[in-house]
Amino acid sequence: MLRKLFKFHGGVKPQTNKTQSTTEPIASVPLPDRLVIPLHQAVGGHPRPLVQPGDHVLKGQRIGGADGNLSSAVHASTSGIVRDVAQAVMPHTSGLTTLSVIIEPDGEDRWCELEKVNYRSTPPDELRDFLRDAGVVGLGGAVFPSYAKLKPGKEGKLKTLVINGAECEPFITCDDMLMRERASDMLKGIVAMRYMLQAEEVLIGIEDNKPEAVASVQAAIKASGETGIEAVAIPTRYPAGGAKQLIRVLTGIEVPHGRRSTDFGVQCFNVGTAFSIFEALEHGRPLISRLVTVAGNVTAPRNYDVLIGTPMDHLVRLAGPRPDTDRYIMGGPMMGVRMPGFDVPVVKATNCVLVGSATMFPAPPPEMPCIRCGECAKACPADLAPFEMYWFSRSKNFGKAQEYHLFDCIECGCCSFVCPSHIPLVDYFRFSKSEIWSREREKESADGARDRFEFKNFRQEREKQEKAEKLAAKAAATREKVATEGAATPAAADGEAAPKPKPSGDDAKRALIEAAMEKARQQKAQVAPKNTDHLAPDVEADIAAIDARRNAAPARAADTPDA
Amino acid sequence: MTGIALVLGAVLGFASIKFKVEGDPLVEKIDAILPQTQCGQCGFPGCRPYATAIADGEAEINQCPPGGEEGIRKLADLLGREFKPLSEEHGVEKPKSVAVIDEATCIGCTLCIQACPVDAIVGAAKQLHTIVAAECTGCELCLAPCPVDCITMEAITETVDTWKWRYPVVEIKAA
């Protein structure tokens, strides 16, 4: 039966360059001398380090604990000794550092004790906690913690579970090779995910330039005997692998601005994620390795099963980089980002290390003015107007850029690809987005500071008032006391004046002052020098002797000896 | 006619109660632009008093060093006044920083706690004080009262979470 497919707007057809790296099967990588495992690899909070320098860790041991609502654990990729828990450069364009665990492998590659889970007999909440602690995150590139997505939504069930095997970005073939070689395991992961999400049907979307993968997945489905799972070949057009675009192609549902696909009964996962869920549930193995394509300026492009934390240059060396190599790009040529160095580690988000050189990726021609030809709008798969967003981003009019739905931009790069003026549109959009985020953060902290400042003022006012009230109460009490005493005294002394019911203001004040002065006098009398009281007899004798000497001293000074 | 007048009068009366504006909206708008550092460099005890002074025409818009040039531009836009460079007598624009207490030197005198406008310093008498960095606005008001000079200002460094994509630079080739 042929399934009716839908189309998404726009898209481009860049040269795919995928055949070079699919000729050889997936290879393993020899252990490097050093693994650098950043603790912060996924969207969400920073995991806390659970190990200290000098600790011996086993393969699969948790070294970073999930912290906060949306965070995911990190594990040791091999057994060895923790050399350091320190800041290290992370695979990020900025070249900034992040807290990382540096492990020196001991070569034994010994697993820690692994705990399997039967997903059918485990409550969903426990299962999600298990996947969080197994560090399973989306391997399509966004590294969103998977457990947070494995919730069936309000209705308690899902209509369609979309599995993303489209892999539309040029050069990258790691999902293709996974589907070719590990389809049956991946399928078991999909079955578990389908159970967790209570999905009616499962659609595995694969671009039709990967016929081997389609055949392999179809054979695996047939062999497993599962029903309601279908591998669908979709037309090759970049970016068919975007979640919203793939959902559109397979189900015809267009997820509108500000809504989630689960609101429409659809959820989307990458094929690599399905495989790592299988590994976690079936073998208890946390996510410590992933498939990485090494392609571009190398003599033997290939896919490798790489331990997280492996330095990129260690990996690329296996594929034979050409001598003019001057850059590594993490990801593909459309969406990838240039790495700050060659020794940055492979992380969970690394689907491809694209090796580049100046001849392979020549510097773009100079940017020309926008002629508002509208090509970018025709190519935009998110139905945006990039030329308008460009205009406002360029002039730093961020409010306006947001009005044109800047945050619906998936940064796929189609607009920059088609622009006849060679404008790096996506760079402008990324700049705008991060500026807006930073302003939002600033605004939030300013609002917090305002609240705290106002509260402090309020508190100081309140304290002042409380103090004044306390003083007033005390003064009133004293006044009353003086009034009663004052009333009693004259009556006793004179015997003629009738006791006044209430002294007038001046009298009361005077009485108060007198009372205070009397009190002070009494206190002064009490506060006699204390250090000469209660002395031991010998000390008293000493003092007497000193006094005697002191009395004698002036006499001696006057040179008239007395005794 | 009288009926209409009565009805409309009632409606207007109701609307004036229902949609009553609390406080001065202009002060709110100005206050929203100010950076809430509460440093007092403008000569007023906090951002809100300065906002009130601007609204009343008693203060210039260029007296806020933490707000910087961008803040002045925003105020100029909002109030329809001419842009002016930051007034020098009120200070200079500095990179955002937080206060740090040297734990070895702090004697626990609580003077900085009293000076902090946003309650970002924790401590008690004769106990070590520390700064809640996330709440510190970098106002520098705690520096002067410290009798042992154990507070320093440290510029906030960029992390991966706060890193921003740079403005795309257009390279101009030499002819």
Image (spheres, rainbow, N blue to C red):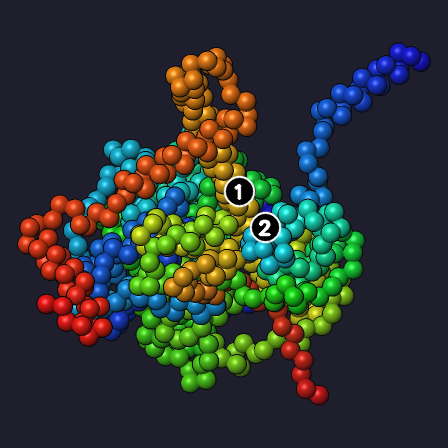
Q: Are marks 2 and 1 on the same chain?
A: no
Residue closest to the eye, A58 or A300: A58
Secondary structure of the residue carrying numbered label 2: loop
Q: Is residue B55 above or below residue A343?
A: above
State the residue in front, A88 or A7. Answer: A88
Q: In which quarter of the image is residue A226?
A: top left
Mark carried by residue A311:
none
**At 45% from the left edge and 73% from the top edge, which residue is drawn?**
A340
Q: What residue type is labelled 2?
A: Gly
Mark 2, residues whose alpha carbon is within 10 Å: few (<14), some, or many (≥20)? some
Q: Mark 1 points at which residue?
A: A457
Q: What element carries label 1?
A: helix
Indicate the chain on which mark 2 is placed: B
User: From the viewer's perspective, is residue A65 above or below residue B94?
Assistant: above
Q: Seen from this angle, which residue lies furthest bottom?
A: B175
Q: Name the amino acid, label 1.
A: Asn
**Quadrant in which the C terminus of chain A appears:** bottom left
Contact check, label 2 and label 1, Cβ < 8 Å: yes
Residue picked out by circle 2: B46
Q: Is residue A488 above or below residue A549?
A: above
For image coordinates 40% across by 19% down, the residue present is A493
Q: Does any portion of residue A206 appear in the rendered image?
A: no
Q: Which residue is drawn at 34% across and 67% down?
A: A87
- Looking at the picture, does residue A478 appear above or below residue A435? above
Residue B45, given in percent of the width and then of the height, sits at 59, 50
